[in-house]
Image: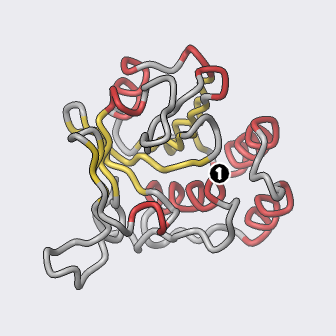
Amino acid sequence: MKNNIQPFSYQQSSHSCWIVSFHNAMMAIYGTSYKVPHDMSKLFYNISSDDGVSNRDMETILKHVRDRNRLKIVSFKKKHINRKIIRRHLKKNNTVMICDINSGKHSVLVTDIQEDELIAFDPDWDSVMTGDHYKKKFTCCPYGDEEKNLLNPNHNVSIKIDHLLKDPIHKKDKFVMGDVSKRHVAFISKLK
């Protein structure tokens, strides 16, 4: 991921996590000079509902964006998502992953992998503002300094890859994919 990108955005409506994660992915790939074209943003929000974005609509958006922006977008679903696939794709230069968690009820952006830890941005401020951590499986880190003066603009949660792939989901669990039948990830990178 580029170091000189503008801070990522948090969602302003309850079911816009995938859309905001996608906008943030474009900033991660293109840097500060990229602005999401208005017609594309309009498509994103028009296709969403009070329940978020369906997998079918998600694929429609990804195809439209891929064709228009010369992006490589590779999606995986259900049992085809594993640590090897995640590792292989995130290790490629300038590739990000939009990942559904909580059995498809929420989406986060993963921008990097460092050993077994995924560097991510959760667009739901309420989810990360507490600074939660759970048995070293994930750590919410919304602040960039110990005095909590500066927000960390592009990384607010670190997730162990085995925790992300955990199934089934328990009430205490955050940042897990959950039910295998509802898993979806999209790896996005710019074509050269």
Who is closer to the viewer here, 140 or 27? 140
Viewed as shown, does residue 20 lie left or right of 90? right
Image location (x, y in percent) of residue 105: 64, 44
Image location (x, y in percent) of residue 123: 51, 62
Would you identify the image quadrant in which residue 58 lies?
Answer: top right
* Residue drawn at point x = 52 percent, y = 36 percent: 187
Q: Judge whether 46 appears above or below 119 on screen.
A: below
Would you identify the image quadrant in which residue 57 lies?
Answer: top right
Residue placed under numbered mark 1 in the picture: 69
Q: Residue furthest front?
A: 171
Q: Judge whether 115 appears above or below 60 on screen.
A: above
Q: Judge whether 112 appears above or below 6 on screen.
A: above
Viewed as shown, does residue 183 lie left or right of 29? right
Q: Residue furthest top?
A: 79
Residue 80 makes an appearance in the image: yes
Q: Judge whether 163 appears above or below 173 on screen.
A: above
